[in-house]
Amino acid sequence: MARGARSGQYPDFSAPAVDRVMVEERAAALGKRSLKKEAKVAGLKLAISMMDLTTLEGRDSSGKVLQLCQKAMRPHERADVPACAAVCVYPTLVPVAKKALAGSGVKVASVATAFPSGLSPLSVKLADVREAVALGADEIDMVIDRGAMLAGKHGSVFDEIVAVKEACGEAHLKVILETGELGTYDRVRKASQIAMLAGADFIKTSTGKVTPAATPAVTLVMLEAIRDFYYATGKRIGMKPAGGIRTAKQALHYLVLVKETLGDAWLNADLFRFGASTLLNDVLMQLEKERTGAYQGGDYFSKD
Ligand SMILES: O=C[C@H](O)COP(=O)(O)O
């Protein structure tokens, strides 16, 4: 049902309650796992390859986006450091990014749907999406209607995502739940399920404009929703924690959560992304520290 979901056909369902204490303890415990040096190096490189390098400021300019694109295509002079997955910008800067990244394989992601509040009429949000796609966006990061979600209007949230998915055409759709405004893990789980049923290619925690943004616990809830959706439908939905992820240590923690919840199949940029404006520098710095000595290949994040 994830592809071709239809407006007005929200299949109401009940979801098991999330145990808050358990989920927070489990998420924290997975951050204490000690990784060997080789696994860290592999994990850090993987994190770079999964990064949506982001700038979403009112003062963004062509110059800033050009710099960001250079950084995304070649984060480090060493040839074994991979390119980032995408750059993520506001719609008016999509053409700048598209031109700069042409032929590189690095995608252009655009926020849309009246990001970050989403408080515009649906017609405006859909026009925002269509315009971003026409300008060259490969991926659209939409925000859900949090007011509707909080009011329990699940059918309305579903219908809006279905409409946005249709407006995306071939562009991939990431659905931002803005978990910091949803208030409970149960609501995060429910919103994840609604987004996946409505056709999301990815579910994403946050805009980066609201605190709290991504946390390991909220990410674990969403990863488990993705796992359950996969068991029920056979469809693999991607995950993007975003907002407040600034250190290599945090990034490795998220990768452990993914590996332990969804397995190696999700350890690639097609199914996992980090949304981050300042994470890359710390990852590059830690990579330099870790790679002293002969690098033999990782035994935990062995994908690259
Ligand atoms: O989607 C990505 C976020 O806006 C980035 O948030 P950040 O600036 O806290 O890294």
Image (cartoon, rainbow, N blue to C red):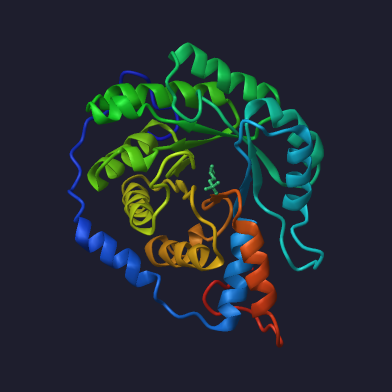
Q: Nearer the viewer, residue 139 or 24?
A: 24
**Number of disc labels:** 0
Q: Nearer the viewer, residue 111 or 39?
A: 111
Viewer can see residue 5: yes
Position in image of residue 18 (x %, y %): 21, 52
Farthest residue to the bottom: give it. 293
Q: Nearer the viewer, residue 131 or 16?
A: 131
Within the image, what quadrant is residue 248 found in?
A: bottom right
Say which quadrant the N terminus sits in.
top left
Tell me what residue is drawn at x 48 percent, y 12 percent: 123
Tell me what residue is drawn at x 58 percent, y 25 percent: 169
Say which quadrant the C terminus sits in.
bottom right
In the rendered structure, the answer to whether residue 67 lies left or right of residue 250 reads right
Position in image of residue 265 (x %, y %): 49, 60
Within the image, what quadrant is residue 49 found in?
A: bottom right
In the rendered structure, the answer to whether residue 196 lies left or right of residue 88 reads left
In the rendered structure, the answer to whether residue 34 lies left or right of residue 136 reads left
Position in image of residue 294 (x %, y %): 71, 87
Position in image of residue 107 (x %, y %): 68, 42
Viewer can see residue 303: no
Tell me what residue is drawn at x 38 percent, y 53 percent: 219
Farthest residue to the front: give it. 59
